[in-house]
Image (tube, rainbow, N blue to C red):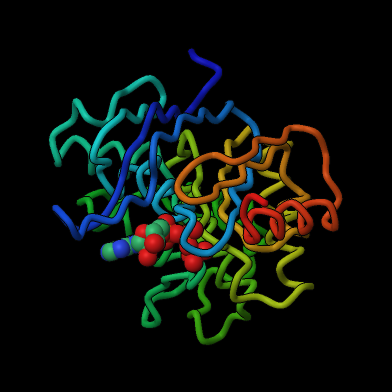
Amino acid sequence: MTTQTAVLHDIRAGYGTGDRQLVALDGVSVAFDRGTFTAVMGPSGSGKSTLLHCAAGLERPLAGSVSIDGVRLDDLTEDQLTRLRRDRVGFVFQAFNLVSALTAEQNVALPARLAGRRPPAADVAAALAAVGLAGRRRHRPSELSGGEQQRVAVARALLSRPAVVFADEPTGALDSVTSRQILDLLRGLVDEQGQTVVMVTHDPVAAARADRIVFLADGRIADDVRSPLAPEQIAARTARLVAGPC
Ligand SMILES: Nc1ncnc2c1ncn2[C@@H]1O[C@H](COP(=O)(O)OP(=O)(O)OP(=O)(O)O)[C@@H](O)[C@H]1O
């Protein structure tokens, strides 16, 4: 088994065609080690979400390759890619994306049900217990706080025991106390279960909880820091990227 769960090699990604083509990622190579927590930061428009979407197989790059658990995504048909995404990749969005008419446990089971499977009730219960919501499994989203709704979304991402969980600004819609609970949860998944987590964030306090911070600027990797940084140092580096080279 490789030590890297997701490997991106020389990725070029963009939108539009011809003269109107916008390059969102311009030759990005990065690999995420198993059992680590990486934050992806950078100015607005620097390509963070595009990077996450390409890594998760939600978007196909124009060039370059992405591998998840040693499987190259560009070798897969759309059906195979859908299956790999469903089985090996978890995704958590800023906006929770829960179905309001369904209970917490029904939301957790929904992706598997849509794929024609009936996940064991014990697995659903275990995923909800892992995020501290064992007692809330029959609640609907409107009966849960924002932080609890995001925890349901994390449980949904964990149900298939994915190789990697990608989170796009998972604390962006939460207050600072609730954000900390979600970050504690993600940190715990990495430390206690060896889960691999890659999180896009604008928040230096959130990024400070990661093992590594990849900074993007103009679709390229501008910095890749594996030593611990304080939120103030992270904010200063981000500000330098926004200002651009002198
Ligand atoms: N669907 C799309 N169609 C056209 N352009 C897009 C699309 N998605 C992103 N872009 C453009 O690609 C570039 C990178 O966008 P991306 O969302 O990856 O940046 P980001 O760093 O995540 O930004 P933010 O922090 O504001 O969310 C931006 O210039 C953006 O406007």
Of residues 131 and 55, the one drawn nearer to the viewer in this rendering:
55
Q: Residue furthest front?
A: 246
Q: Residue furthest bottom?
A: 142
Residue 100 lies, in percent from the top left, at 40, 81
Residue 194 lies, in percent from the top left, at 64, 32
Q: Residue at x 49, y 38 (%)?
A: 164
Q: Is residue 110 above or below residue 139?
A: above
The reply to whether residue 63 is visible in this rendering is: yes
Residue 153 lies, in percent from the top left, at 50, 62
Q: Residue at x 50, y 80 (%)?
A: 141
The reply to whether residue 109 is visible in this rendering is: no
Q: Residue at x 47, y 33 (%)?
A: 163
Residue 107 lies, in percent from the top left, at 41, 66
Q: Is residue 246 left or right of residue 100?
A: right
Q: Quadrant of residue 49?
A: bottom left
Quarter of the displayed picture in which ligand 1 can be seen: bottom left
Of residues 29 and 211, the one drawn nearer to the viewer in this rendering:
29
Q: Is residue 116 left or right of residue 100?
A: left
Of residues 68 and 124, the one drawn nearer to the viewer in this rendering:
68
Q: Is residue 235 above or below residue 216?
A: below
Q: Residue at x 32, y 23 (%)?
A: 71
Q: Is residue 26 left or right of residue 118?
A: right
Q: Is residue 172 above or below residue 169?
A: below
